[in-house]
Image: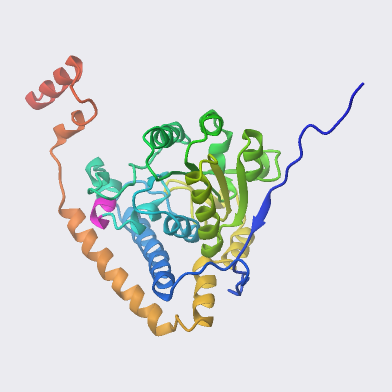
Amino acid sequence: MVKKTAFEGSVEYWQVLDESGNADKKMEPNLDDAELKRMYEHMVLCRIFDRKAVSLQRQGRMYTYAPLEGQEASQVGAMHALQDDDVVFPTYRDHGAYLVRDAPLDGLFEYWMGYEEGLKMPSGVNVFPLSITVGNHLPIAAGMAWGMKFKKHPKVAMVCFGDGATSEGDFHESFNFSSVHKTPLVLLCQNNHWAISVPLNKQMASQTVAQKALSYGAWGVQVDGNDVLAVYVAVQEARKRALAGLGPSLVECLTYRMSMHTTADDPKKYRSDTEVDEWKKKDPIARFEAYLSGRKLWTPQFKAQVEQAVSARIEEAVKKAELFSAPPEAMFDFVFEQKPWNVQQQRDAFLKGD
């Protein structure tokens, strides 16, 4: 009998900023002051947008909404590591993907107010409509990345998903296909420890999500998802590998959903306040503020200026969104290029009041 090691592998954990905002100089990216400030402004924009959306939903001015609070660093860090031509496939919680790309704020509010038209992006905003179904957008992103390789386009596709999506077949099929064909796909998993009400230890027996990359002969890394610079560095590396023809990479961001899964959810039924309080100490914005303060780029006055400017933008966007309306018959439109006869029949009956 022959016994030998058939495979060996390991996964690294990356952190640039510790919880006090101190940087590891060997891993710290070389970003100029203006870029660092933009990252901070985008993180603040994400949080204020998020809290406004929750408030609107509670007032009955918006429908069910999925908050992102606590995951700002994962989304902003990843988006800043991409180029504008790179295409992003977000989930229902990845509002940061749109906000960093300067998508119309009123359109985002319109979408959550019930109008699909809100996610029709202007030319140049290369972010797909968000995916409500868990994991179903992964094969689409894999196909996009394959097309980029086929047409020799020097750009990547990045697909965002949560830890729960890694239990779906779509994740494994997409990863396997992309690895075999060495496509330029970046898989960004925001591991926020909860798949709705199911904790991580009941979802998977593996120690990390990132190690799943090893099963497909790909590169994977686990990063501190509340450290915006660590996420930036990891996604930048994944993008570089993709463009070098090395295939897909899996970046697992260890983070936490501070709020409810959606506004239809009560997280107190399945997790403790103690757990939430522990993660609040790791607030990604507070950590980045400490780092920027050490570089003389942040003051309480600067924070107030950013929050005031962002709040004004958001209030103006809400006003514009609440003036938007679409005819009710629009629900029959824009699904098919050519309406099937039965859909047209339903539309005609609706307009007649039948």
Residue 276 higher or lower than 187, as above or below: below
Q: Nearer the viewer, residue 271 or 194?
A: 194
Residue 222 higher or lower than 316, as above or below: above
Q: Which residues are magenta?
A: 104-109
Q: Nearer the viewer, residue 33 or 353?
A: 33
Q: Residue at x 60, y 52 (%)?
A: 271
* Magenta portion: prevailing SS class: helix
Q: Residue furthest top?
A: 341
Residue 289 higher or lower than 240, as above or below: below
Quadrant containing the N terminus is: top right
Describe residue 21's horizontal placement relative to residue 46 as left or right: right
Q: Is residue 108 located in the magenta-colored stretch of the structure? A: yes
Q: Is residue 262 visible?
A: yes
x, y percent for residue 90? 41, 45
Describe residue 210's horizontal placement relative to residue 183 as left or right: right
Q: Is residue 61 visible?
A: no
Q: Nearer the viewer, residue 165 or 248?
A: 248
x, y percent for residue 214? 66, 38
Q: Nearer the viewer, residue 189 or 59?
A: 189
x, y percent for residue 287? 54, 71
Q: Is residue 113 located in the magenta-colored stretch of the structure? A: no
x, y percent for residue 221? 62, 50
Describe residue 27's horizontal placement relative to residue 106 as left or right: right
